[in-house]
Image (tube, rainbow, N blue to C red):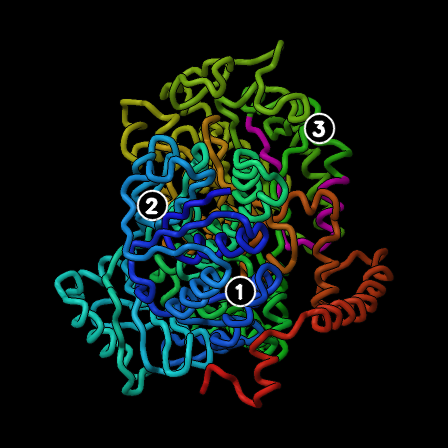
Amino acid sequence: MKTAIIGGGPAGLYFAILQKKQWPSADITVYERNRADETFGFGVVFSDATLDNFEKYDKPSYDRITREFAYWDDIAIHFRGNEHRIGGNGFCGCSRRTLLLILQDRAAELGITLHYEVDVDDESQFADADLVIIADGANSRFRERYADHFQPEVDLRPNKFAWMGSTRPLDAFTFIFQETEWGPFIAHAYQYEPNRSTWVFETDPETFERAGLADKTEAEGAALMETIFGWFLGGHKILTNRSIWRNFPMIRNKRWVMGNKVLMGDAKSTAHFSIGSGTKLAMEDAIALFEAFKRDASVSGALALYETGRREEVEKTQHAADVSLVWFEHLARFWDFDPVQFSFGVMTRAKAITYDNLRLRAPDFVQSVDRTFAQHVRNSGFDVSVDEPAVPMFQPFRLRDMVLDNRVVVAPMDMYSATDGVPGDWHLVHYGARATGGAGLVFTEMTCISPESRITLGCTGIWNDEQQDAWQRIVDFVHGNSASKFCLQLGHAGRKGATKLMWDGIDRPLNEGAWDVYSASPIPYFSDSQVPRELTREDMALITTQFVDAAKRGDRAGFDMLELHCAHGYLLASFISPLTNRRTDEYGGSLENRLRFPLEVFDAMRAVWPAHKPMSVRLSATDWAEGGVTSDMAVDVARLFSEHGVDLVDVSAGQTVREARPIYGRMFQTPFSDQIRNEAQVATMCVGNITTADQVNTILAAGRADLVALGRPHLVDPFFTIKAAAWYRAQAIHCPQPYLPGKEQIFRNSVRDRQDLEDLKIKGRPKTRAELKMEAAGKPLAAE
């Protein structure tokens, strides 16, 4: 096979090495525009897991790489005069130049032809090549030449960054968050060889402009960084190497393959430097392509395997990078946090590291996180222990006069099991079981205010005495047999009404027996859905009255809290979203106008709902569709509701229009809660693929929400909360008297089970290379 590789970076060189080693007869040529020893930047960073991969695929280059690397185990976070160090991370750094020289030497040793200072402009010279690898970097000219085919998406992130270096030795991967007269600057720093460390400086565009960096030379920019971080540099210099301030490009391509040509490395995809995965991604691309050729020797077959098999892993890494970079882009949200909570947020920003994970690796740090959280709770008026604090999920929370024993919430979940809107025995058992399971707060499903406001024929309602009495029976059971508080969620289906039961076809229109549906504008949900009638002013007055009557009935039934459903494309949400509100009157157009009717309904309900009882609103923080509600818009919506007296924002997302393209994943809606809570300064509840107590604690401890709602986990495990209490030894959890023997047993068993699991994890965790190096040398190499 004849292979031509455009670009002599880590991706192209490493594939050449693996291909030549496996198939010695392969004719491989690498073309690089720069000199052999010329490179930008300073160090690169790998995790222990990445090095394990390198060892498996090419031991000779691995041996040389590991001899040159600096190792460290800690992450050090400096913020507002405080340093927090978290161990057990297993990182290593190497000079980018050294890495390239090692790979070049290994390639030459195997007989690969290397051409330097060759600027390939026309790939037709490779017409006789069986395989052409395009690995010419983030600014790939060939990707752009064939942009119509590859369909690249380049997202230039707003923050500015510059890649510099220093002679300052470091013994940890170091984050420094520095306030200046112009705004905050961030340093991401790590050692890569004795007396050399990489420093990536980052700041927001406003601070960049105020500091005058746009008009400074490379040397002047470095001098400013020396001044800002001089207290830490201790006289060491900042070094430059084409250290130009720029915006980071997040690069994705719809296609990676064109005939016998394939994108690799930064030409194909990038990952933000805050997770240190750029070079890792490039070299793992090479491994994935090599494995594809091992499975299918044909070029077309191997390239197809590479693209389909590699894409998911790349997208996972890029998603983690996206989450991480957004955290750094929005420092203002967290700048007033306690340094301990701030540092916990840094560690858990990309979701890979969690509360329990950190507790195993850095128990003292997590204990300080718990104490800090408990101190905030104590400052809010609760007599909780700070010296021996409960974990965050078992700290109390107050909304007006309603006090929750813990932060776990049973999310609103439609049961579609009512008859004529009347909740029956199913609902009594469903809500009763989850309340006796220990959750601090239980939500009803969306309960409808009139027959025509239902989503389906199976939806519950509260528009008549029979329904009110049925709900009161359930409320009385919850209050008589648990410590849970009970929230009534009220809503109107709008254009998504008169549809089939979920299991018969979610959101699909009824074949018969449908009723008229309403919306902000006459836009059907599906093309074959019923066209809704645009609400008139008279319709709005009637619906407002129905909401008020339902709120009064909810109070008489004994509910502790009331929520207004303004999400998921239902009636009130259809006013908020510009995708579903095309009105030209005072209820359409600007955000203030689109919010007019939902706020009128809320105000009318708040006026009749007892002042000592809280009210919340459920919002879709994004429509996941172009031209729809965005998270920034949702902050304004939440702020306006807060000004009207809302106590909690229940943050959800999507389900507004069928063409939405949501981005799913663990805790995928939590970032919206984080933004609304910390920008609008209102209490929030998050929901969305949250499945474990560990995730609940992570979200709360990082200040991303005040309450955490779980849906599906509660469907299969009503006693989720009591089990979590046993695991975290939260003895104060309420348990019905008939179940106390079970509680006592699980609390006894969980002490042993938890210790066994933690011992197993600790014993099963291989020592990091930094730990092994320390054992061998008696001191960390990175400090030399």
Residue 61 x %, y %:
52, 66
Type of amino acid at the residue the image marks with label 2: Asp
Q: Which residue is mark 3?
A: 417
* Count of labels in the image: 3
**Residue 274, image x, y percentages:** 41, 62
Q: Residues in magenta?
A: 429-449
Which callout, 3 or 2, points at the residue further toward the start of the chain?
Answer: 2
- 45 displayed left or right of 22: left
* Residue closest to the eye, 12 or 88: 12
**Is 431 within the magenta?**
yes
158 vs 755, left or right, is: left
Helix, strand or loop at mark 1: helix
Q: Estimate the spatial distance between the alpha carbons at disc 3 and disc 1, rounded to whole Å.
A: 37 Å
Residue placed at 28% from the left, 64% from the top? 162
Residues under labels 1 and 2: Cα distance?
31 Å
Q: Amino acid at mark 1?
A: Ala
Q: Left or right: 745 with respect to 344?
A: right
**Residue at 85%, 64% in the rendered image:** 745
Q: Is residue 614 above or below residue 538?
A: below
Q: Would residue 681 be visible to someone looking at this image?
A: no
Q: Which residue is mark 1?
A: 701
Tell me the element at label 2.
Answer: strand
Q: Circle 3 — which element? A: loop
Q: Which residue is mark 2?
A: 155
